[in-house]
Amino acid sequence: MMKDIEMDEQFSKLASLIGEKARAKMLWHLLDGRAYTALELAVIADISKQSCSNHLKKLTTEKILKAEKQGRHKYFKLFDKQVANALEGIAFLTSQKTKREAIIQPNTGIKYARSCYDHLAGYVGTQLQEGLTKQALIQKVEDQYLCTKKGEKKFLEMGIEINPLKALNRKFAYPCLDWSERKHHIGGALGAALLKYMMENDWVRKKKNTRALLLTSKGRQGLEATFKLSL
């Protein structure tokens, strides 16, 4: 009984911590996987630097964020991928309150393509997952994606080696529920490697002050030529 009460209190404390308006704005922005200074986060949340520092102290104390010092500046980022997944989960619950948008997708904006911590999300992310699965480059087994022999060969042609990804201290690949599409995109080491490849080859570009990604014409051509994915 005491453990239940303690859990209730901890859950309530955490929900309050994340739900506060200014902190929620900062956390939503930090889902792009990058690190920001206190001043940058203060601008994002539209609060004073002093107020922002108080919020950041609470978030780092509870291990929602972590701070890293580089030179004269201190940078803040999400504590780990579990925090990112939890925040995306909250966003999914929020999207359930609204009706599904028209099937026609605008080819820009955060719902079309965005970073989900370090992997690709949005319409493009879910289409990529469906394309890789349809072509038998990956296959879903319970709560994870496995890379097939065909997939290993394809990814190696792209310069993505599968065994080193499997050796990392993280999940190799898993279905990450997309809050805007209500389908799955690819999370984990493979998802991060694919987004890194797309960034390095100018298939997608980051937009300033947003998690939205721009899918370039080169990216459209690359997705079609490499994965037979028409967008």
Image: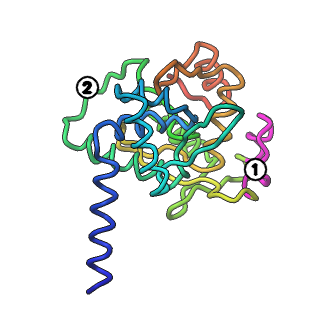
The answer to whether the residues at label 2 and label 1 have Cβ atoms under 8 Å apart is no
Is 212 located above or below residue 217 in the figure?
below
- Residue at 65%, 55% (x, y): give it: 172
Is 6 located above or below residue 160 in the figure?
below
Is 148 located above or below residue 73 in the figure?
below
225 or 128: which is nearer to us?
128
Q: Is residue 226 left or right of residue 174?
A: right
- Residue at 65%, 37% (x, y): give it: 194
User: Which residue lies most toward the bottom here?
Assistant: 1
Dot 2 alpha-carbon crowd within 10 angstroms: few under 14, some 14 to 19, many 20 or more: few
Determine the image quadrant of residue 218. Answer: top right
Determine the image quadrant of residue 197. Answer: top right
| C-alpha separation, residue under disc 2 versus residue under disc 1 | 37 Å
Q: What kind of residue is marked 1?
A: Ile
Label 1: which residue?
A: 162
163 or 151: which is nearer to us?
163
Predominant secondary structure, magenta span: helix
| Disc marking residue 102 | 2
218 or 204: which is nearer to us?
204
- Residue at 30%, 55% (x, y): give it: 15
Q: Is residue 105 left or right of residue 147?
A: left
Magenta region includes residue 155: yes
Q: Magenta residues, as a range?
A: 152-166
Determine the image quadrant of residue 34. Answer: top right
Mark 2 or mark 1, earlier in chain: 2
